[in-house]
Amino acid sequence: MTRQAPASDADLLFRVFNEVGIIAQLSSTAFERVMPEGMTLAQFSILNHFVRLGGRKRPSDLASAFQVTRATMTSTLQRLEPKGLVEIVADESDGRSRLVAITDAGRAMHADCLQRLGPLLADILAQVGRGPFAAALAPLAEIREKLDRMRD
Amino acid sequence: MTRQAPASDADLLFRVFNEVGIIAQLSSTAFERVMPEGMTLAQFSILNHFVRLGGRKRPSDLASAFQVTRATMTSTLQRLEPKGLVEIVADESDGRSRLVAITDAGRAMHADCLQRLGPLLADILAQVGRGPFAAALAPLAEIREKLDRMRD
DNA sequence: CTCCTATTGTTTGATGTCGAACTATATAAT
DNA sequence: ATTATATAGTTCGACATCAAACAATAGGAG
């Protein structure tokens, strides 16, 4: 066999990615079950971004920030905009670009989501405890950072 | 740097779930880019399950094992079966059920996938190192287990 | 200015995923 | 036996996501 890495290492990576995949799945669906009708994690993340950082951003910058393709961002913005949660205007300094900003309705929706999220997070904290999360954060951040760098 | 050290518990959970989501996204797309045409992580996972454990399983048992809905498993099996990678027969002891098993073609496909996965895992290991994965595994497993239990 | 290349946003087609509703079968209650 | 409930698998509609292909605009090389 031409194995590039010892079986134990490959196995370790495999298991971590497996756990990560399952947790991502479970958490996002738990998330969306308590959200207002029609709100998804992807949509909330965009609102959250603007609430925390403000300003206007181009769709392609949002795509980079969230590690998704431009096509994916187009799709998500096309769900947020008709609901009046974000506002999209032309960029006068660049004919190719558009600029996205959150609206008052978007801020209200974000606040509503946070309200509903509180009990869910409290429940998870009660069941799981703070320990595993505190232990996982730093290594996860490092893995994410380096994987991120590998894409370029 | 308004807040650096003392983040709230909600914030901690939020960050962990955020990292987990991004890593799941990055890893699954990296996986699928090196897989044979048409193979996805979901499909490979099923083949992998049968290669490791053998035997026959009902779709609903597979759905439980992979933490997806029965509808999702139906969809994935409906992609594997026409390709001849799994075999699905009626369960004679229960008229509602069907039984899934891997085929020789499925085993060959699985072997091909493993071949292609090797270099990718080796690359990741070289870039990230073993440490963060080793540190993350146990806490992730605990989080996954408890989140899992919350669903019932 | 003209041509080539890079970037932006979009569309299209495929896949995975969920929740809800449905059919068929099995099991329990009466 | 009839009825009620539970389970297995499917279908449907919605959403997120990717890759690939496309149109429009920007910027640089001549």
Image (cartoon, coloured by chain):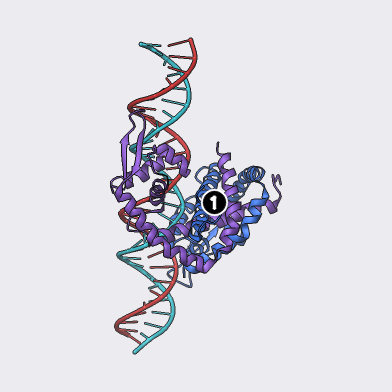
Chain colours: A purple, B blue, C cyan, D red
Q: Is residue D11 above or below residue C24?
A: above
Residue at image position (54%, 60%) is B101
Residue in front for this viewpoint, A3 or B99: A3
Count residues near mark 1 (Cα–Cα under 10 Å), then give few for <14, some for 14-19, many for 20+: few
Left or right of D2? Residue A59 is right
Q: Is residue B103 above or below residue D24?
A: below
The answer to whether one can see residue B82 in this image is yes
Q: Spot the residue most to the front.
A: B2
Residue in front for this viewpoint, A135 or B133: A135
The answer to whether one can see residue B103 in this image is no
Coordinates of residue A139 in the picture (x, y in percent): 61, 52
Q: Is residue A33 above or below residue B31?
A: below
Residue in front for this viewpoint, B136 or B48: B136
Coordinates of residue A138 in the picture (x, y in percent): 60, 52
What chain is tagged by disc 1?
B
Residue at image position (56%, 47%) is A144
The residue identified by callout 1 is: B4
Residue at image position (62%, 60%) is B138
The kind of residue tagged 1 is Gln
Q: Tell me the quarter of the picture where residue A146 sits.
A: top right
Tag count: 1
Dot 1 falls on a residue whose secondary structure is: loop
Left or right of A26? Residue D3 is left
Residue in front for this viewpoint, B13 or A11: B13
Coordinates of residue B94 in the picture (x, y in percent): 46, 72
Left or right of A147? Residue C18 is left
Left or right of A57? Residue A15 is right
Coordinates of residue A142 in the picture (x, y in percent): 60, 48
